[in-house]
Amino acid sequence: MEYTVDYVKAIIESLGGIASAKELEAAGVSRLLLYQGMINGVISKESHGKYIITDNQPDEYRMIQNRSEKMIFSYGTALFLLGMSDRVPHELDITVPQGDNVSRIKRDYENTRFHYCKKELWDLGITDIITPQGYKVKVYDLERCICDLIRDKKNVDSQIYTQALKEYFSGKCNPRKIVKYARQFNIESKVRTYMEVL
């Protein structure tokens, strides 16, 4: 089967508007065909080993998360993607394990704010969600987001904080799960107080 540049475009589009050289190779795209697409101006190199369609606006969430599998959308960004906030994030909140170097990503994407957590707690509550453009990304679940907001109250927008906690504890609360997470973050008493009050 002979592949064309249009085939390469279709593959990139199906992967959220950005594809790695490895993903393209697995789909049968040769480096020569990829290079042809770049010469013709149809395909552009987004970063090392990552390619986009030149005239498309790729899914920003997918594009940023594609830079590292350790980046998880959190705080206000996760709440927006989970439908718990109506505020479209101007700055994307991302959590990574302590010690990860994200300086290149910070430089390339100025609209990001990074949060660091202990490596043993980093993967607690990771789930998949579909972005507004229809692509799958990783976010923290509601219980993890609520725990993060309570732990980091001083650095969280008060409107997002209030709206998320009221909405969660007044209807979407999963008591066992939130208490389990709260124990791991040493904030169980604070969470129980919110459960009683709200």
Image (spheres, rainbow, N blue to C red):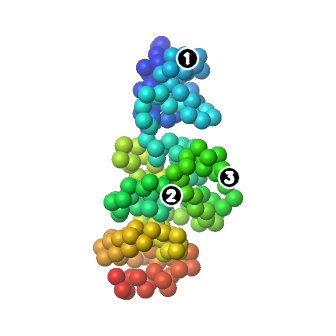
The residue at the point 53 percent across, 80 percent down is: 187
Res 33 visible: no
Residue 38 in the image: above or below residue 164: above
Is residue 83 positioned above or below 162 on the image? above
Tell me what residue is drawn at x 61 percent, y 65 percent.
Answer: 117
Distance between the alpha carbons at the discs numbered 3 and 1: 33 Å
Instruction: Kindly indicate whether the residue at mark 2 contacts the one at mark 1 (C-beta within 8 angstroms).
Output: no
Quadrant of the snapshot with the C terminus: bottom left
10 Å crowding of disc 2: few (<14), some (14-19), many (20+): some
Q: CA distance from mark 1 to mark 2?
A: 35 Å
Residue corresponding to mark 2 = 93
**Could you say which quadrant of the image residue 116 lies in?**
bottom right
Residue 88 placement (x, y as % from top left):
38, 55
- Whether label 3 touches label 1, CB < 8 Å: no
Q: Position of residue 103 (x, y in %)?
A: 66, 50
Residue drawn at the location 53% of the way across and 27% of the way down: 44
Residue 46 in sight from this viewpoint: yes
Precedes in sequence: disc 1 or disc 2: 1
Farthest residue to the top: give it.
2
Looking at the rendered structure, the kind of residue marked 3 is Asn
- How far apart are labels 2 and 3 at the CA level? 16 Å
Nearest the eye: 40 or 193 = 40
Circle 2: element type? strand
Q: Which is more N-terminal, label 1 or label 3?
A: 1
Q: Residues within 10 Å of mark 3 (few under 14, many from 20)?
A: few
Amino acid type of the residue that numbered disc 2 sits on in the rendered structure: Asp
Q: Based on the displayed image, in which of its 4 quarters is residue 20 positioned?
A: top right
Residue labelled with disc 1 = 39
Return the residue at label 3: 101
**Residue 2: % across, % down:** 48, 13
Please report whichever mark, 2 or 3, sits nearer to the chain's N-terminal start.
Answer: 2
